Amino acid sequence: MRALLPGVRAVTLDLLRFTTAGAVDDGKSTLIGRLLYDSKQVFDDQLEHVAIASERRGGAGALDLALLTDGLRAEREQGITIDVAYRYFATPARRFIIADCPGHQQYTRNMVTGASTADVAVVLIDARRGVLEQSKRHAFLSTLLGIPRLVVAINKMDLVDYSRERFAELVAEFERFARKLQLQTHGDGVKHGITYVPISALRGDNVVERSAQMDWYEGPVLLEFLETVDVAYDHPYERPARFPVQWVIRPAASASAAATGVASDYRGYAGQLASGALQRGDEVVVLPGGGRTRIAAIDTYDGQLEEALAPMSLTLLLEDELDVSRGELICRPDEPALVGRELEADVCWMSEHALQARGRYVLKHTTRSATAIVDQIADRVDVHTLERTEPAAELALNDIGRVRLRTSVPLAFDPYARNRRTGSFILIDEASNETVGAGLIN
Amino acid sequence: MSVAAAQLGGAQAQARALHAARPLLSHLRALESEAIHVMREVAAEFERPALLFSGGKDSIVLLRLAEKAFRPAPFPFPLMHVDTGHNFPEVIEFRDRHVRELGEHLIVASVQESIDRGRVVEEQGPRASRNQLQTVTLLDAIAEHGFDAVLGGARRDEERARAKERVFSFRDDFGQWDPKRQRPELWNLYNGRIRRGENVRVFPISNWTELDVWEYIDEEQLEVPSIYFAHERPVFRRDGMLYAWRDGAELIDGERVFSETVRYRTVGDMTCTGGVLSQARTLREVVAEIAATRVTERGETRADDRVSEAAMEDRKKAGYF
Ligand SMILES: Nc1nc2c(ncn2[C@@H]2O[C@H](COP(=O)(O)OP(=O)(O)O)[C@@H](O)[C@H]2O)c(=O)[nH]1
Ligand SMILES: [Mg+2]
């Protein structure tokens, strides 16, 4: 792999994606509302709207900040979150994309949707109710999905008299559970701990403003944590290059090309660099076929580049005429992806129709689609104990288990733990076209 | 500095390049790359996609993203505009010129034709708007051309129902959105599988904010219709909004036409899009104004969303964008 540039330090990302997790009614939506409200990121008309809607729901004068994200009619009627809401806000330190997720077990698939792209998960725990199964499930899913950092917000501290003892008790309880979680290690080799913050989303304690009620707490308030957390992404230079071919650009194939004056033999392989960096002149291998050539040019609308970094979208021109098409993966020969038709993966099942051994599904991985057959369900995870059971006959809705699959065509992949982009796939039901499973390759 | 670093956007990136020896993509360039990826997925996975182009700022950004995704080849889809017949003339002029300059093909689906053919009945009176009628014209055009995917410039920051919508938003054969049965959407793996008659609405700039859009327009130096900049025009005040006076508009008791310096934050139908008082006459000034605003884009300019708490959700369930 390419040596690091000398004098390199970690760079703080200017864009942080985070997600909420935890059981229903733990206060996730209220917390997001509070975060937006206290950091003055709510527009006047939105606020007016929330005030009117709160009143309609009988909230005697008090603003129900959860209404800032619970935007669907059914959500407002029932006072719950059904699907992920995306919100955007910025402070001088960073920009944030928030995915506010539902807590109901029934809607776990929507939580997984929000969590799949997150850098940080904020796991909420209701200080009175303690660590519920759903909080554990979500914390487990968050780490399984490779979210680099977890912060546990012990909420509703106002209902336990802002008790330091209760906070310590819950931290200890969660730590006992968390010992079994596969917390991510990063390029720096450090296994990051979990940060715990005692808050009241309703009253605004320790969310944006430091609480006057809990002077015993010396850690960061939640926003401060989010502004400064180092998700320690490896720089593209430290990662193998992975370029799934998405689309072949051949202007000559179109009638109007002659008029545009583009060379008639232009043949560009367009896609988004999933990880790593590529330079003009690099030797590359096209997987799964194995053909080798060099990068003749890195083309973009804004001109040619000497070097491209993930996650740029770009077009590669190759020196030799290889038969390359959508679904193939371009990498460097000294750091190739794995190639095979047999996969072992953790699968989160998201359909009412159980996953069964010998089931057939459409598998979508990077830019390639294949048919997949399930050979075996090797185990199932008990979300309470995080223990893996014996081989299972099926995975029901919201189950997670280790599955062995065969695919109709070879795939070029990496283990999910090493690459979220080339290590993930979805399963689609051939008859209903629904997305039924999320897979993380082992 | 490497060429990659030179690609990074804006002053912020230059500062970073100075302070850190490690170039990374600016947040705007990361959003751009994500959107290009979405567009190419659409081109690759659907048989007959189309891109909605209204001449508004979001769809102008979509066209630049399409250029970045597909040039030097032509776009692998036609452009389409649902024309209510009540659009700002400046926008229609811009629309046609921009399409011509790009050398692409535009389909105009006309609400007037839907009215003439008896597909819809026009509202009457001074508050009549063709906004609702657009949905029928859109669905008819999708059916007529057999489109299986339609790219649009909607953003999640616009409105609370949109904040809930997937990038690939599945619509049944009535064009309906079912918010309680959305497909899970993980990572950047989009499920575009549909049956005949169904379609997918695709929103490549879902994760952009209004400010992102203007900063991008500024960085890319994109041309936008003149009504986005402060200008003087005859207006009348209704329900706290400043509507453009146009021939055929009816006034209600007490309303009068006067001249005001306004600009538009959105360029929808003239009958339901209000202007805002503004002195912003350049892109930079618009960016500064948007960065400081205390009111959302729709809240300040769209009458159609004031009707009920879930106006947009209801329209989307009926097949609207
Ligand atoms: N007392 C108290 N109530 C809270 C707090 N945070 C949220 N709640 C209430 O808990 C209920 C559930 O909140 P919500 O945000 O909808 O929970 P979610 O399901 O996790 O999104 C609502 O009635 C909130 O007002 C808090 O810090 N203290
Ligand atoms: Mg909620």
Image: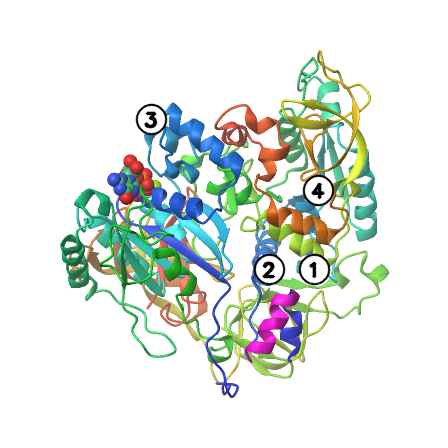
Contact, mark 3 vs mark 4 (Cβ under 8 Å): no
Which quadrant of the picture is home to ligand 1? top left
Q: CA distance from mark 4 to mark 1?
A: 17 Å
| Type of amino acid under label 1 | Glu
- The residue labelled by disc 1 is B219
Q: Nearer the viewer, mark 3 or mark 2?
A: 3
- Mark 4 vs mark 2: which is more N-terminal? 2
| Type of amino acid under label 4 | Gly
> Is label 3 on the same chain as label 4?
no
- The residue labelled by disc 2 is B28
Q: Chain of mark 1?
A: B
Q: Is residue B123 magenta?
A: no
Q: CA distance from mark 1 to mark 3?
A: 47 Å
Q: Which of the two residues, A395 or A291, is positioned nearer the viewer here?
A: A395
- Alpha-carbon neighbours of circle 1 within 10 Å: few (<14), some, or many (≥20)? some
Tell me which residue sits at (35%, 70%) in the image. A417
Is ligand 2 closer than 8 angstroms to the Cβ of mark 1?
Answer: no
Q: Nearer the viewer, mark 3 or mark 4?
A: 3
- Give the magenta-colored segment's residue range: B10-21
| Type of amino acid under label 2 | Leu
Q: Position of residue B295 (x, y in %)?
A: 57, 39
Q: Position of residue A358 (x, y in %)?
A: 30, 55
- Alpha-carbon neighbours of circle 2 within 10 Å: few (<14), some, or many (≥20)? some
* Residue A69 in which image quadrant: top left
Q: CA distance from mark 4 to mark 2?
A: 19 Å
- Alpha-carbon neighbours of circle 4 within 10 Å: few (<14), some, or many (≥20)? many
Q: CA distance from mark 3 to mark 4?
A: 42 Å
Contact, mark 2 vs mark 1 (Cβ under 8 Å): yes
